[in-house]
Image: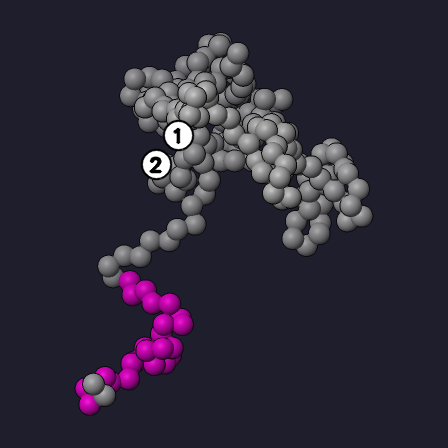
Amino acid sequence: MPRKLEFIFGNEAFKVAIHKVDRSKVYGRVETETFDANMKPCTLATLARDGRTIIPYGGTASGYVNTEGLWVTRDELIPINRDGEEISEVESSFKAPTKLTEEVDIETFLDHPIRLAYRLDAETEINDGLMQKLKAGAIYQFPFSYRGGIYHDPAFLMMGEDDVLWMLIGHKSEIEFVGFEQAAICAARAEELGEDDSGETDAFDFDML
């Protein structure tokens, strides 16, 4: 059963059911089956480090231990940053309504590579003003966390040309673009070429060839 999110726009709230759309739903998928010489299906197994023990699929798991080598449960873990300071955890977006207040332009949206796409089906009536803005191409950005954790992902609410609502989740790209008018050269390479602070380079001596 699809999970439901609640949004607030202005003073009105509305709920939507989310449906994940992945490549397999769009393009289909291919599964590879392996058989032995007797045409019996093979299953995945892991060979242990001793070189003799075979561990069947599902026979391994991961866990957490402290500095003394003692087993600890996940709820005992405390997230910290690089300076050793405790990080406040965020709640799942399904536990509280999300306010739609930040409208962004298409350039901001395109600065975020998208990794997850969800089709939204309205469970309750959506604010008329919001619907008109979305149909006109408005994009709303908001923080989203599926299970909760140490950070939110940037998410976007928008409408397709077929009037279908979408929630797209990505991350901020750190790529910087260089135009034709800009000169780009890394510092290390500049030193190799003999460039000084004035930007002048040593003349090339053809006698060296």
Q: Residue 56, relative to residue 182: is it above or below? A: above
Q: Mark 1 highlights which residue?
A: 139
Left or right: residue 172 versus residue 97 is: left
Residue 79 x %, y %: 69, 42
The answer to whether marks 2 and 1 mark residues whose Cβ atoms lie closer than 8 Å is: yes
For the stretch drawn in magenta, the main secondary structure is loop
Residue 190 falls within the magenta-colored stretch: yes
Is 32 in front, or is 125?
32
Which colouring convention does the figure follow? one colour
Q: Nearer the viewer, residue 58 or 108?
A: 58
- Mark 1 Cα within 10 Å, few/some/many (few <14, many 20+)? some
Q: Position of residue 6 (x, y in %)?
A: 54, 18
Q: How many numbered marks have been drawn onto this rendered protein structure?
A: 2
In this picture, residue 159 sits left or right of residue 170: left
Q: Residues within 10 Å of mark 2 (few under 14, many from 20)?
A: few
Residue at the bottom extreme, as displayed: 207
- Start-end of magenta stretch: 182-207
Q: Position of residue 130 (x, y in %)?
A: 42, 20
Q: Secondary structure at mark 1?
A: strand
Residue drawn where x is 61% and y is 43% of the image:
51
Q: What amino acid is at disc 1?
A: Ile
Q: Quadrant of residue 103?
A: top left
Which amino acid type corresponds to the residue marked 2 in the rendered image?
Ile
Residue with the most extreme front position: 38
Task: Give the residue drawn at x 41%, y 14%.
Answer: 128
Any mark on residue 106, and which? 2
Examine the image and state in which quarter residue 25 appears. Answer: top left
